[in-house]
Amino acid sequence: DTGVSQNPRHKITKRGQNVTFRCDPISEHNRLYWYRQTLGQGPEFLTYFQNEAQLEKSRLLSDRFSAERPKGSFSTLEIQRTEQGDSAMYLCASQTGQETQYFGPGTRLLVL
Amino acid sequence: GENVEQHPSTLSVQEGDSAVIKCTYSDSASNYFPWYKQELGKGPQLIIDIRSNVGEKKDQRIAVTLNKTAKHFSLHITETQPEDSAVYFCAASTGGFKTIFGAGTRLFVKA
């Protein structure tokens, strides 16, 4: 399967704990996006990488959130000191050039 | 800021009928309009897209129309089937990194 993959698919954590999610994009795609999706809403942009460079971050992304794409391939999204309001689906998408974004299956986070 | 409004939020149709979902965008620089289908527990999957230099595009039972003057675009699904039941999202992009999504339409196709 050469699509976008995300791990884990589900994560339950206690408030205050740190969590890290991984995204593996389609191999030839140089752009990688992170989105957050809450129930009944469309995906909301969090951050974007072109190769290894993080070029844009949303104001939604508090300083507890950090993302990396160290070698321009896979990416990680870390949330420190999780809060209940962080509960959501975290989606990764990849893109080449200015073409379509292809989404992964998402990581569903529940903060208790 | 830029936004995309999507209507209706819920749509229920009988199998075989047509379904229409409408979106309005605010950023006149938008030039790419994808539509995504999201099934329960899965990420959004592209079903059709249209660029601003085209007014209509069709792919089997799915068609999309674009009215740039009115900043409206619509998804049309004909001969609906139960497997079309899902949440559908419209989106608008200026071709850069930013894609703005609508809030989604939950489509129920009753057998």
Image (cartoon, rainbow, N blue to C red):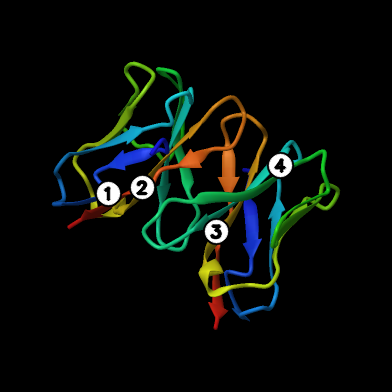
The reply to whether label 3 and label 1 mark residues of one chain is no
User: Which residue carries the number 2 mark?
Assistant: A106
Query: What residue do we see at 40% from left, 63% from top?
Result: B40
- Label 1 element class: loop
Q: Which amino acid type is shown beneath numbered disc 2?
A: Gly
| Secondary structure state at the residue bearing disc 2 | loop
Identify the amino acid type marked 4: Asp
Q: Which residue is mark 4?
A: B27
What is the C-alpha distance between the residues marked 3 and 2?
17 Å
Q: Amino acid at mark 1?
A: Arg
> Which one is in front in this view, the residue at disc 2 or the one at disc 4?
2
Q: Which mark is residue A9?
A: 1
Q: Is residue B19 left or right of residue A63?
A: right
Distance between the Cα atoms at labels 2 and 4?
A: 28 Å
Disc 3 on helix, strand or loop? loop
Contact check, label 2 and label 1, Cβ < 8 Å = yes
The percent position of residue B65, horizontal first and vertical second, equals: 78, 54
Q: CA distance from mark 2 to mark 1?
A: 6 Å
Marks 3 & 4 on one chain = yes
Query: In the rendered image, which residue does mark 3 sit on?
Result: B103
